[in-house]
Image (cartoon, rainbow, N blue to C red):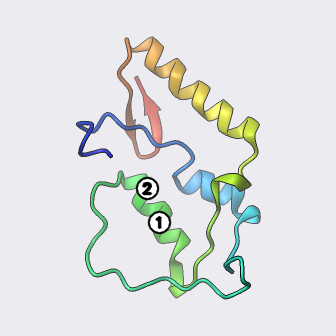
Amino acid sequence: MRSALDDDVVSILMDRAAYERFADRGVNVDRRGRLLVAAPRPRALVGLADAEREADALVCSDGQVRRIEQEGIPPEEAADALRRVAGAADRSGGSVRTTGGSIEA
């Protein structure tokens, strides 16, 4: 998506702080109870911001997977994050950039 939209994509809750904040809501088994295991990566992840890449490394550390599904994030927390992004866009005339997972206008 980022490449198609000329880097005008802002991720929310996709960084180390969010991972650590919601880690207790994560799962390490699938819906059938099977342990999630990180698949070998044939190549480096492209198109991710540094903060997203760091979060991915946390999710797949040590060959184990601790996945936090979006449904596990309280709706009010997601809404607050969206409001912060929208506020930054309003203050900057519609343009928002991210640096290391933080939002800057």
Q: Secondary structure at mark 1?
A: helix
Q: Quadrant of residue 95?
A: top left
Q: Quadrant of residue 16?
A: bottom right
Quadrant assignment for the C terminus: top left
21 vs 96, left or right, is right
Q: What is the C-alpha distance between the residues marked 1 and 2?
A: 6 Å
Which image quarter: residue 35? Answer: bottom right
Q: Where residue 8 appears, x then y in whole percent?
A: 32, 33
Q: Helix or strand or loop: what does disc 2 sit on?
A: helix
Whether residue 9 sits left or right of residue 23 in the image: it is left
- Tell me what residue is drawn at x 52 percent, y 79 percent: 61
Asked whether the residues under the numbered discs 1 and 2 touch, taking CB atoms below 8 Å apart as contact, a structural biologist would say yes
Q: Which residue is mark 1?
A: 56
Task: Answer left or right for 35 relative to 103.
Answer: right
Q: Is residue 63 above or below residue 71?
A: below
Q: Considering only vertical position in the picture, is 64 above or below 71? A: below
Dot 1 crowding, Cα within 10 Å, few <14, some 14–19, many 20+: many
Estimate how packed mark 2 is, as few (under 14), some (14 to 19) or many (20 or more) residues with alpha carbons within 10 Å.
many
| Residue lying farthest to the front in this orientation | 32
Q: Position of residue 72 (x, y in %)?
A: 73, 55
Q: Is residue 102 above or below residue 38?
A: above
Q: Residue at x 60, y 52 (%)?
A: 17
Image label count: 2
Residue drawn at (34%, 55%), measured in percent from left and top? 48
What's under tag 2, amino acid-wise? Glu
The residue where tag 2 is placed is 52
Q: Amino acid at mark 1?
A: Asp
Locate residue 77, reporting x and y percent: 71, 39
Q: Residue 86: where, in percent of width, then height? A: 52, 22
